[in-house]
Image (cartoon, grey):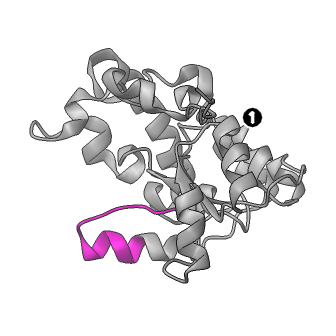
Amino acid sequence: MGELKKLVEEGKIKYIGLSEASPETIRRAHVVHPVTALQMEWSLWSRDIENEIIPLCRFPQKPHTGFVEKELGIGIVPYSPLGRGFFGGRIVAESVPPNSYLTFHPRFQGENLERNKKLYLQIEKLAQKHGCTPAQLALAWVLHQGDDVAPIPGTTKITNLDSNIDAVRLKLTEEDLKEITAVVPLNEIAGSRTLDRLSHLTWNFANTPTKEKKTGS
């Protein structure tokens, strides 16, 4: 972090961001130099950052978010806001392409996928109610979590890009947000949010070691 601070002071970079950082790491880094943005997985079915990470980072927000404590004022950049494509449409929710890395993801395997399909169908029904696609509704839900939230959905198709942009136009009320959240209960999501072999890299286990002080001989 100290080296990144030097780059800011030299004018070589403007801002510093972190990804999948633990609360302790965020606080320690912020002391060295203000952190501008934090990239974390956040979607309808990945909400584990809401209890600790979000309150730590954010500015006071609208009542519906439930996050009112101002701590560090760090912007939040949710990756995989469509649940790694799960809420992108029935094609992904119903069958995973055999050459996709998702075949190894716990939530897209066997019985877990069958159970999670039920959650997708609930979002699909609500999307019809709002006159949009499931992907737009899922993305709009993330966008409505606060003005300090800038999700980064990925796609390789222009049509999907245009559709994602249109999600910005979708206006959801406090009651809408509660309804959307309620149809994807956390206790009904089957499978962990990341590959088992990569779980040690998630923020829950990502405390960086403290710098050892040099001692005299």
Residue labelled with disc 1: 51
Q: Residue 39 magenta-drawn?
A: no
**Nearest the eye: 167 or 36:** 36
- Which element type, helix, strand or loop, lies under badge 1? loop
Is 105 positioned to the left or the right of 208 in the image? left
Residue appearing at x 61%, y 71% in the figure: 170
- Assign the C terminus to one quadrant of the image: top right
Instruction: Give me the residue at 62% from left, 30% from top.
Output: 216
Q: Residue furthest bottom?
A: 11
Asked whether residue 176 appears in the rendered view, the answer is: no
Q: Is there any visible trace of residue 84 in the rendered image?
A: yes
Q: What is the x, y in percent for residue 190?
A: 45, 21
The residue range painted magenta reads 151-163
Vertical side of 163 occupied by 48: above or below: above
Vertical placement of residue 68 versus 37, above or below: above
Q: Indicate whether residue 158 is drawn in magenta.
A: yes
Q: Residues within 10 Å of mark 1 (few under 14, many from 20)?
A: few
Q: Residue furthest left?
A: 99
Q: Position of residue 58 (x, y in %)?
A: 78, 56
Q: Nearer the viewer, residue 50 or 37?
A: 37
Out of 173 and 153, give the one closest to the viewer: 153
Q: Residue at x 60, y 20 (%)?
A: 187
Q: Is residue 72 left or right of residue 80?
A: right
Q: Amino acid at mark 1?
A: Asn
**Viewer-nearest residue: 70 or 214:** 214
